[in-house]
Image (tube, rainbow, N blue to C red):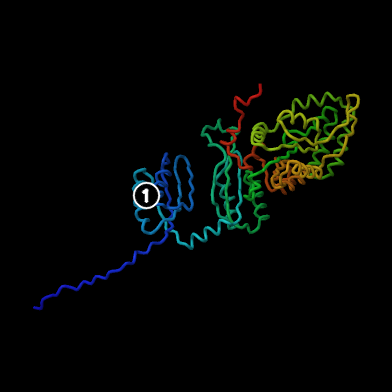
Amino acid sequence: MAQLMPPHIYYIETNMEPTVENELILINISGHDKPGVTSSLTAILGKYGATIMDIGQADIHHTLSLGIMFMTTSDKSGEIMKELFFKASEMNVEIRYTPITDADYALWVKNQGRNRYIITILGRTITAEQISAVTGVVAAQKLNIDAIRRLTGRIPLDAAAQQGRKSCIEFSVRGNIQNQAAMQSEFMRLSNELGFDISLQEDNMYRRCRRLICFDMDSTLIETEVIDELAMRAGVGDKVKAITARAMRGEIDFKESFTERVALLKGLDESVMKDIAEHLPITEGVDRMMSVLKRTGYKIAILSGGFTYFGNYLKAKYGIDYVYANELEIKDGRLTGRYVGEVVDGKRKAELLRLLAQVENVNIAQTIAVGDGANDLPMLQTAGLGIAFHAKPKVKATARQSISTIGIDGVLYFLGFKDSFMEDAKPQADDAEP
């Protein structure tokens, strides 16, 4: 039997080092949130000199969802992942990892340059049906949702504590809208059908730097039309209300209707105006909204087809910066049935908005207008952000943003304020007036 010979073993000496390449890895961490999770995991990455390419975190009812994309080298990635898995086990959280190709990363970077939009939905409550409907429109436009955040506080389970509550959710979406007019129209339809409010805004620097906000007064800051209140005191309430309703619906020219209504007030005692001013029904949410706007540096104006007497009353009450409205002529303590100066109609409101933007040295895109009637449409369409508030059907049908389900402080959510921020904006004891 032949003897087996041992195999020949050849050794080749070389000075070549193993090839070291960069690797991109995405890790997703989930589990019960606790202090130190992010710190501990990034400490491991830092130990090996990894570069963070992207990071994002959300916490829902103490449940953590953390994503980190990092770059390292192929000679370190194995050790990094081993230590990450050990640390995740120690902290009782789950970790998953996904290698990212250069092509996938390049596509992701490219998409970051696409247009971004903020969609805000609010109401007394937000339902799954409403969210499904809104996100369905987003998907139909081939937009991606990058982030979702809640702007309002948590909803109490006690039904009694829910009285007056508000719910607001903000979506950050990315992509190129295929048909913005159609998207806006569908949002307004869903808003009416499902009972919620919605705003669609481009997420640009102007949205983040709003500085001037202009309000209509009657049926916006106050829950009445002052001219109707005056008319009731003059005994011509029904006549004036009928004209007012037609004007707000856009059925007749505002200036013409204004002249007719003021004429019917002839002979009314001036003292009536003081009594009405002291008992104006303030719209829900005005106090909160004005407090936040003033403390965060907004310039505030009233641009009203009503009367300066009542606008100045609100100016003193809330520290409003500008009031432009109509001046009633008074002689011997009684209204003459005439007005003084130019009528503040829809066209004039838009002109005043532009003028105030120039005075305050802000871009028109940094302005906001809020109103309810047909004579508010020009300024709503001129402002960077026009909001129809509990508006007449004609106004709401053409509005880009609308609030109909909650108080006027809903405007703050369209500006991106969170409840927690607004709580911080409350006057402190040291700020209180003596």
Q: Going by the picture, which residue comes out furthest to the left?
A: 1
> Foreground residue, 401 or 52?
52
Name which quarter of the figure residue 255 lies in.
Answer: top right
Q: State the residue at coordinates (82%, 29%).
A: 232
Amino acid type, mark 1: Leu
Q: State the residue at coordinates (59%, 37%).
A: 166
* Image quadrant occupied by the C terminus: top right
Q: State the residue at coordinates (72%, 28%).
A: 317
Tag 1 secondary structure: helix
Above or below, 356 against 85 in this view is: above
> Foreground residue, 83 or 291?
83
* Image quadrant occupied by the N terminus: bottom left
Above or below, 183 against 367 in this view is: below
Above or below, 107 against 352 in this view is: below
Q: Which residue is mark 1?
A: 84
Q: Give the image location of residue 204, x and y in percent.
A: 63, 50
For the question of whether residue 140 can be seen, the reply is: no
Q: Give the image location of residue 326, x and y in percent.
A: 83, 35
Q: Give the image location of residue 224, x and y in percent.
A: 75, 33
> Foreground residue, 92 or 189?
92
